[in-house]
Structures are given as C-alpha cells and as structure tokens.
Image (cartoon, helix red, strand yellow):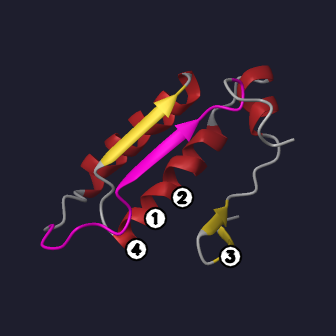
C-alpha cells in the first residue's frame, strides 16, 4: 500500500500491525515503508528541512529518511521554500491515548 488521501491535508499509510511487527516480532520492515512514504512526499512537495521525532522508533525512521535522502541525492535546488516546513514523528508507545 501507499499513502491514502483522506482529505486535502490528511494522508494515511494504513499499516495496522506496525507495533506488533516491530516490537513483538522484531521486524522493522514497516518502518522502512513509513520512511519510503515520507521520501515520496519529499519528491512531490520538496525537501522537508526539519524532521523531529519523539521515541526510539521515530528516530529510526528519521535516520532511514536521511540515509535515503543521501542515497537519492535529494538535495534538489531549493529556489523556493518547501511546501512542508517540518515533520514531527511521534511513536505510538510514547503517546498511546491519541488514537482513542
């Protein structure tokens, strides 16, 4: 699956088993899908200059994104400001109440 638009400013990746796969089974493949989706957003809307995260998994995703950015040479000429100024990643284990 890829990013699914729910509204003009709401996108979802719809990965319901990320916590189970990552923390119980130790499979971090779903984190790669999150990083790849965010990289796709950067190719569409410009490089996101600020990536912040709260929690260990968020830091892993941010690290993956920076590595992918270097590999893809996504340092495109920034003649105009990016459409997305900042991304804040929050682990579900840090904030479990919000989805409820």
Asked if disc 2 and disc 1 are in contact, CB closer than 8 Å, the reply is: yes
Q: Is residue 86 a member of the stretch shown in magenta? A: yes
Q: Is residue 93 left or right of residue 62?
A: right
**SS for callout 3:** strand
Residue at image coords 25%, 47% = 70
Mark 3 to mark 1: distance in Å? 18 Å
Which numbered disc, 3 or 1, marks the residue that appears first in the sequence? 3
Which numbered disc, 4 or 3, marks the residue that appears first in the sequence? 3
**SS for callout 4:** helix
Which numbered disc, 4 or 2, marks the residue that appears first in the sequence? 2
- For label 2, count other residues whose C-alpha is less than 10 Å away and answer few (under 14), some (14-19) or many (20+): some
* Foreground tag (3 vs 2): 3
Q: Is residue 84 left or right of residue 79?
A: right
- Residue nearest the viewer, comparing 66 with 55: 55
Asked if disc 4 and disc 1 are in contact, CB closer than 8 Å, the reply is: yes
Main SS of the magenta part reads loop
- Disc number at residue 97? none
- Residue nearest the viewer, comparing 69 with 52: 52
- Residue nearest the viewer, comparing 2 with 51: 51
Which numbered disc, 3 or 2, marks the residue that appears first in the sequence? 3
């Amino acid at each position: 699956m890829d990013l699914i638009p729910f509204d003009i400013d709401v996108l979802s990746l719809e990965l319901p088993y990320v916590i189970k796969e990552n923390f119980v089974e130790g499979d971090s493949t779903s984190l790669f899908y999150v990083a790849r989706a965010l990289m796709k957003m950067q190719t569409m809307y410009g490089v996101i200059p600020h990536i912040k995260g709260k929690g260990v998994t968020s830091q892993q995703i941010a690290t993956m994104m920076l590595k992918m950015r270097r590999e893809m040479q996504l340092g495109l000429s920034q003649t105009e400001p990016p459409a997305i100024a900042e991304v804040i990643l929050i682990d579900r284990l840090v904030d479990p109440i919000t989805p409820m």
